[in-house]
Amino acid sequence: MEILKIIKQTTTEVTADDILYVIGVAFLGIWLLKTAFGTKALVYSPVRRNKMPFYLPLVPFLIWFIFAPAAMAVKERLFPNLLDWQQVLADNAIISASAIAAMTITLFLVRKYFVRGLKGFGLNHRSIPADFFAAIVNLISIYPLVLLAIVMTLYIGQIIWGPEFELAQHEELKSLIQYSQPYTRAMIIITAVAIAPVFEEFLFRGLFQTLIRSYLNRPWPGIFISAILFASAHANSSHWPALFFLGICLGYSYEKSGSLYRPIFIHALFNSASIISVLHST
């Protein structure tokens, strides 16, 4: 009877996160065994032939980096008395518009500098169904490492800065909690789930990672360097370790499949899960 009570108590305490963690550990373990701890994982990864100059990835980045602050400054001058929720709505609209402009330029550059154009960049619509389901598996597989990075960041942070140290919440998630206006929430979700993943994957995986691989002629250095760039581009440094592991997953999925849709889906699913978790807890 005591054993039955223990089993019942254990099963009632199991959460969805626990199940995902166990499945993720299993997927990751299988991958490590099948690929000799990753050493054979990308032996036959497709090469993305291109004629990119070394400065090319900076072009869309600078377009976004210059256009977004400039547009926000104009907004402040023209509409100085917006309410807080209207400010958040306008800022997200500007960020999205800037990213769309940068992505449009990226597609133009890709057609010019990649040997097979958009397909050589990894945008082949025929692979979308397979990429979506593979993205789910890839995200579950990396979940244990992302969670471990979060736990270790908290542990080390509390040792250095004291027991009051906590991971700061992302500004977009804070805004979702703070403002319940439908248009503001919709704009935040569109920015986080649809616009940011596409723009960031175009930039960090499609351009930076491809350029690094072209110069070094090996996939893994490009994956690691692009993951570092991806993590450090986010304002909150306490998120960098977790984002680095996510970046590794994004870069690996791109090299393994040759499809940019796969990391885009992983990124969008990751952001969606964060948003759902926050909305569910409020």
Image (cartoon, rainbow, N blue to C red):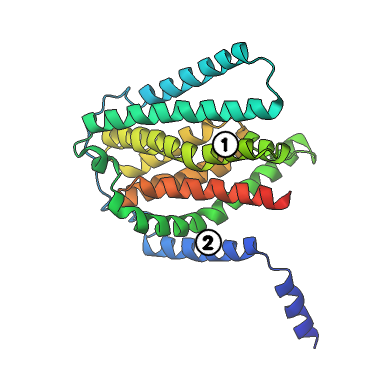
Above or below, comparing residue 77 to residue 280 in the picture: above
Kindly identify the amino acid type of the residue bearing the numbered disc 2: Gly
Q: Residue at x 26, y 24 (%)?
A: 53
Residue 169: x, y in percent?
A: 67, 38
Number of labelled discs?
Answer: 2
Q: Quadrant of the N terminus?
A: bottom right
Residue 163 showing in the rendered view = yes
Q: In this view, which residue lies farthest toward the left?
A: 115
Mark 1 Cα shell of 10 Å, populated few (<14), some (14-19), many (≥20): some
Is 178 on the left or on the right of 235, as rendered? right
Residue 168 visible: no
Query: On the image, numbered disc 2 is attached to which residue?
Result: 24
Residue highlighted by disc 1? 187
Tag 2 secondary structure: helix
Farthest-out residue, bottom: 1
- Determine whether, in the image, residue 179 is placed left or right of residue 68: right
Asked which quadrant contains residue 88, the reply is top right
Which of pointers 1 and 2 indicates the residue nearer the eye?
1
Q: Is residue 160 left or right of residue 182?
A: right
- Spatial separation of the CA atoms under disc 1 and disc 2: 31 Å
Label 2 Cα neighbours within 10 Å, binned few <14 / some 14-19 / many ≥20: many
User: Image point 38% across, 39% down: which residue?
Assistant: 205
Residue type pointed to by label 1: Met
Name the residue located 24 percent from the left edge and 32 percent from the top edge: 111
Secondary structure found at label 1: helix
Q: Residue 107: x and y, percent?
A: 31, 32
Q: Residue 65 has which mark?
A: none
Q: Position of residue 103 (x, y in %)?
A: 38, 31
Q: Which numbered disc flags the more N-terminal residue, 1 or 2?
A: 2
